[in-house]
Amino acid sequence: MISKRCVIALAGCLLATVPAHADTEAVLYSFAGGSDSAEPFASLFNAGGLLYGTASFGGGSTNCENGCGTVFTITPSGQETVLYSFKGGRDGAHPDANLLKFDGRFYGTTGVGGSSNCADGDGCGTVFSLTSAGKEKVLYPFDVGDNGSSTDGITPIGSLINLGGTFYGVTGSGSGAAEYGTVFSVTPADSESVVYEFPDSGGGGHFFDGAFPTAGLINVGGVLYGTAGGGTAGEGVVFSVTPSGSENVVYSFKGSGDGANPSGGLINIGGVLYGTTQDGGAPSGGCPGGCGTVFSVTTAGVETVLYSFTGVHDGAYPRSSLLKVGDKLVGTTQWGGDITCNKHQEFEGCGTVFSVTLTGTEKILHSFRGGSDGTYPFAGLIDVGGVLYGTTSSGGANNLGTVFSLTR
């Protein structure tokens, strides 16, 4: 089983310089670890003006290294409360995905925990529900059989989507002979089904249909769309799958100017899908493999690169989903920005918040400076009353991540 930290820690390289700080950023909360949360990798969720999120570590449990993770709430003024601390047993551990609200409860996934039958004994992951009072229930624990093989997938680190009262998600590995991951469904009444198993298409370890999905799905006209690795060039795909299990590769990245490794989720604007690739794009001295892109793709498979990051002035290595704000798309890059942050390290710069127009004009809204300001934003942003809110996975007063706001 792929280790938790290997799933999170992907590689890239970049060089960046200092852009202008045009917008007002404020750190609302610095996570402290221990019984508090630590290291958030997911976007926030707004429910009635209160922000909800997940943190991969913290919570105080001794069953996991540095805690098993939490669900937390935070007010726009920065008052944080741990709503639930995972214990690392059947209840799950290390949530990395956004939350979904349905019928008065919150739903999410944990990458490990649940059954203890997985190879490393940490569990195969769960789908869980949580009340606003902090009462948790496991809807489905993923598992493996006596032979160590999965029939339903393992490592469901992506977020869920609700389609007609049934939740759909992805597992990053497991299920079938290939064990390249799945699309699954689960009902609030605990009934789980594998919708699609990514196959060894072509034989010999090829995954032309996609493999190892980690980002959540979106619904476009009753069809689910997502991103995965694999493809004809091994650089990732955008795929579609119907609730009945018919899968199609919408676009297979070539790994050159068109981008590579689309690890974030998609958004739908007028029937056109928009997303980011963490590598590829136009050649750049800042990143030998490309610094990543913002792209669009039609449901018919016509892909366009809106912007290629250079790693010089504009950030690099975007992994987040995008958010439409007015006539622009807003997202984060994990690295790049101010080279005085993390200078002379393998990856220079501590990340950015950026915007890009649908015609490809990019602007840095904030360049993280490390220290108390926050470092390495993995997740996308949300818009609450014209103020953007997000998380950084590290940095802050305790170097365990932050919640920040950005006033435009």
Image (cartoon, grey):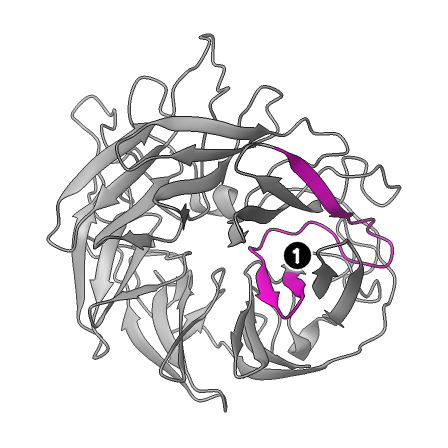
Q: Is residue 98 left or right of residue 31?
A: left
Q: Position of residue 42 (x, y in %)?
A: 47, 61
Q: Residue at x 49, y 27 (%)?
A: 249
Compared to 86, does 309 lie above or below?
above
Q: For label 1, count other residues whose C-alpha is less than 10 Å away and answer few (under 14), some (14-19) or many (20+).
A: many
Q: Give the residue number, with chain letter if any, for mark 1.
A: 334
Compared to 281, does 210 lie above or below?
above
Snapshot quadrant of residue 261: top right
Q: Is residue 324 visible?
A: yes
Q: Quadrant of the N terminus?
A: top left
The verdict on residue 22 being magenta is no
Q: Is residue 146 left or right of residue 241?
A: left
Q: Position of residue 104 (x, y in %)?
A: 21, 72
Q: Quadrant of the C terminus?
A: bottom right
Q: Position of residue 317 (x, y in %)?
A: 69, 49
The verdict on residue 305 being magenta is yes
- Read off the magenta span: 302-331
Give the residue type that dot 1 points to: Gln
Q: Is residue 94 left or right of residue 388?
A: left
User: Which residue is at the front of the view, 359 or 156?
Assistant: 359
Q: Position of residue 273 (x, y in %)?
A: 55, 46
